[in-house]
Image (tube, helix red, strand yellow):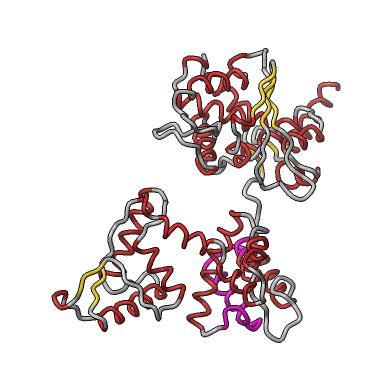
Amino acid sequence: MPLQRDVGQYVKITVQVASGLTKRCVTWVKSLYIVPKRKARQSKSRQFYCSCIYQSHGGTRSKQCNDIARVIWEYAYQHNIWLTAEHVPGKDNYLADREKTKFVNMSCVREKYKDQGLSDNAIDVIMSSWRKSTKKQYTTYINKWNMYCTENNVHVSSPVVCDVINFLDKLFSEGLTYNVLNTARSAISSFICLQNSEFSVGNHPIISRFMRGAFNMRLALPRYVNTWDVSVVIRYLKQQSPTEKLSFKPLTMKLVMLMALLSGQRAQSLQMLDIKNMGHAGDTVTFVINQLIKQTRPGFHVKPITFRRYTYDVDLCVVKTLDVYLEQSSGKRGEVSDLFISVQKPHKGVSTETFSRWLKSVLTSAGIDTKQFKGHSVRSAATSAAFGTGTLIQTIMNAAGWSSECTFNKFYNKQSLTDHSFAEGVLKAADNTNSVD
């Protein structure tokens, strides 16, 4: 039943949080008033939705948010308080950012370790064992688990095994794939302990059997079973010449694709390149990556990325393209030391997502089907092309940052769409036999 409201008898304030509300509710209240730093269209959408939640005394998109909003309004009415949702400038949104960071850092996991008596510093070290991207993935499914527990009266950190299976089955019924279910299982296993069981969520026999069934019912195949022809993109890049006369955006696109093709590195690694860690000696340019990347683990880190001058065709020389790019970007980057800066003002360092989008843009311009192939396919196409021309596997592994040959063979070694098939080879053999006769 909608709440009745009469603004005249209430004191209007911008934010008021009841001391009796839960910590999660307080965090949610604060985050509504101070919009997190996101892309403008996302922030605008979220701000509009938050305003609707408050000013309409609830909403229908999230039952949990709706219930919290009603509790807040009931409290406000009882104390003659009128709440309004207002925009706060980005420079003042530090509070929401701080609360959001705590949430992304998997607060449920933190609380579990705190209950075990660990100090805050010890918990910080343990939480650092998960990379930022992993925390981002886990947070989505921890949220879903919390909502499931609330709706079904399940203990959040100490459920029985059937509750976990029912939760995974709910996700499976929503159309989620085996890989996503695996992520959800890993997320909740990071902080829950099953009641009356010596097994963890990750190795419980019934849960493992359920996961096997989900795999069989919804087969998870690799995204790419083949790859595109590198020569098509190379010819397109050659057309983007002379390099010195390119404007900043096409010059950036050309350098991005050349570096991705010639290094065999992930977009994440190339996005981290910094001119402070660049060495330019003669015909060679070397970048040292001193940050954590996906391959980094104890005892192993990616080797310096090296680019050499290509004298056979200056239009495809990555070192020359880099020199022109550094000259054009010097007046735009200010104090930004990231190698790649945005093509639009303000010229800041770019994210991995932007770098991948640039790669996809070049693929589209070159005529590659980007409905099938995304930016990450450049790594597979480049290494497969090198292997197809006879490059030693150890050379490919060193360039791409792999320590095992099976990584390349299992995930990256793909056949080009233009390669001759096995059947064509057999038929050609028959043609050769006929010609001899």
Q: Quadrant of the N terminus?
A: bottom left
Q: Nearer the viewer, residue 74 or 411?
A: 74
- Which portion, as a residue range, is magenta? 155-183
Relative horizontal placement of residue 379, taking residue 402 as reference (left or right): left
Image vertical order of residue 371 relative to residue 67, above or below: above
Q: Nearer the viewer, residue 227 or 85?
A: 85
Relative horizontal placement of residue 195, taking residue 398 as reference (left or right): left
Q: Position of residue 89 (x, y in %)?
A: 32, 51
- Whether 110 is among the magenta residues is no
Q: Position of residue 368 (x, y in %)?
A: 54, 34
State the residue at coordinates (58%, 22%).
322
Q: Position of residue 247 (x, y in %)?
A: 44, 21
Q: Position of residue 172 (x, y in %)?
A: 57, 69
State the residue at coordinates (53%, 33%).
363
**For residue 356, which quarter of the picture?**
top right
Q: Quadrant of the C terminus?
A: top right
- Whether 165 is among the magenta residues is yes
**For residue 4, which quarter of the picture?**
bottom left
Q: Secondary structure of the magenta portion, mostly?
A: helix
State the residue at coordinates (79%, 28%).
390
Task: List the single residue furthest toward the right.
Answer: 437
State the residue at coordinates (38%, 53%).
42
Relative horizontal placement of residue 258, taking residue 18 as reference (left or right): right
